[in-house]
Amino acid sequence: MRQSTFVLTLAFVTCGPLVLSSHGAEAHLELRLRQQIETEPAAGRFHSIWKVQHWQAQETAVIVCDMWDLHHCLNATRRGAEMAPRMDAVLKTARDRGATIIHAPSGCMDFYRDHPARQRALRVPRAANMPPGIGEWCDRIASEENGTYPIDQSDGGEDDDPREHREWADKLTKMGRNPNSPWVRQTESLLIDGSRDFVSDDGEEIWSIFEQRKIENVVLVGVHTNMCVLGRPFGLRQLSKNGKNVVLMRDMTDTMYNPARAPQVSHFTGTDLIIEHIEKWVCPTITSNQLLGGETFRFRNDRRRRLTILMAEREYETNQSLPAFARRHLGRQFRVHYVFANPQQRNDLPGVAEAVQDADVLLVSVRRRALPSRQMEAIRQFVASGKPVVGIRTANHAFSLRGEHPPAGTHVWEKFDQDVLGGNYTGHHGKSSAVTVNAAEGADLHPILDGVDLRELSGHGSLYKVSPLHVTTQPLLVGSIPLEKPEPVAWVNQNPAGGRVFYTSLGHQRDFQQPAMNRLLANALLWAADLAAR
């Protein structure tokens, strides 16, 4: 399979609409493709990298996958209906720019047998260069062998309430539909332009359309990402392995995933996990606002906050402990995005500017890094916006080089601790026995400590010297070691822009082996995001 090459140093990319420029009769589409690139071979950690590409509209097709009129899953039917108007706007814009629109409601060709768009597809000559197997379902491509499929969909992925599902099946039966496969056509919410569009669910027909119209670039929209969008003969896998510049429009899709199955996250997080899998092993993704402007599409029931986690320290391996913590504890309340350090360049966090720009909450686990101007400015702007910040362990010296001059082209934030966290880090005590942790005076009823059994919480890293805290802080936990005065190990603060802040000097690898530590940090993120405790 052809693999794209991405460079870790990127130009700034805004979130505005698609840029179109005319050169003669050609319209050029400026798209921002996102892909996951492994930080280094076999690391299991990935940078989110954005790359700008320019596509000629007349060499571009949009395939609408299985946007049926009805589905056996009631919630899938509802989500499809909610997404369809936005998708129709995408199709109209792409069509008007000169792109080819192919409607592919699988199994529904009989309904469209006399439709001009179906007849147009049937008249296309068979391509001479038909790839082997292009007319078949594709379960997996070679690159996916390097990863682990992220969700359990073995039950078919239905997420309906059982009572509603039974009632829906009864209703479908009374309508004369097969409750297991009730679709007969594409949803009426999507216009099929009889004068320009195509209707086909056949991989060989669609490939022939590509060849006739010299299509090199393909955008997939529709459902369901983990099944049909990936596996159909015209799906992402087939097109990727056969050399097309194919992308998924990640906010114009949905999955079949039941949150009761592994990894037991929300339905929408299940979709995000499949999108990450696609970006790692299959193809890049784009979003609908690149054509339409404004915000990306979001289902009304997707109320998760967007959490970005920055990890750039070498002592405590939080690049392992924090993703594991997030997968286990945050999959229902947060949409989590990870930013890792560039292992080849210490003072670089690839993709951080885009990730921070899109975040509602920022979790910082960074130690003594200077950052390029654009990256540091994105973090400063996030803090200045009044959005919440959570820091653990080395975050209180995240962007400090102890007063040393930063490398050329990079910047520090020496007073991040004082300006944002409200602390006063001056070093740490040497190795000692585990740090004993107790509630600070008057902190027992704070929601961050709800359900945190302090009898089972201790610190396994050295005790940080952080006193005195800023007057705006409220200490929550105090740590003690023999022969030294106690020090705050967790507190809350409000930064000058009004944003909620939580910091803890806990964060050693062994700390995360304690249920109390996981509960503390999960509570802190919920509090910071102004969400109800679990």
Image: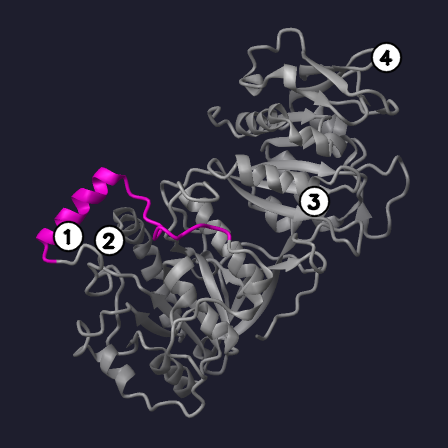
Q: Is residue 105 left or right of residue 331?
A: left
In the displayed structure, would residue 75 be above or below residue 479?
below
Q: Are marks 4 and 1 in contact (CB under 8 Å)?
A: no
Nearer-N-terminus badge (4/3) = 3
Do residues under tags 1 and 2 come within 8 Å of each other at their CB atoms? Answer: yes
Position of 97 relative to 459 (above/below)? below
Query: Is 197 placed left or right of 342 in the picture?
Result: left
Distance from Cα at disc 2 to Cα at disc 3 = 48 Å
| Labels 4 & 2 near each other (Cβ < 8 A) | no
The stretch of residues the image draws in magenta is: 150-176
Type of amino acid under label 2: His
Circle 3 residue = 377
Q: Which residue is mark 1?
A: 172
314, 20: nearer the viewer: 314
Q: x and y percent of residue 174 in the render?
A: 8, 52
Measure the alpha-carbon separation of dots 4 and 1: 72 Å
**Between disc 2 and disc 3, whose residue precedes?**
2
Single out the mark in the foreground, 1 or 3. 1
Kind of residue at badge 3: Glu
Residue 4 image point, x, y percent: 62, 70
- For the point 18% across and 78% down, the residue is 113
Numbered label attached to residue 484: 4
Task: Of the two numbered discs 1 and 3 on the same chain, state the one appearing first in sequence.
Answer: 1
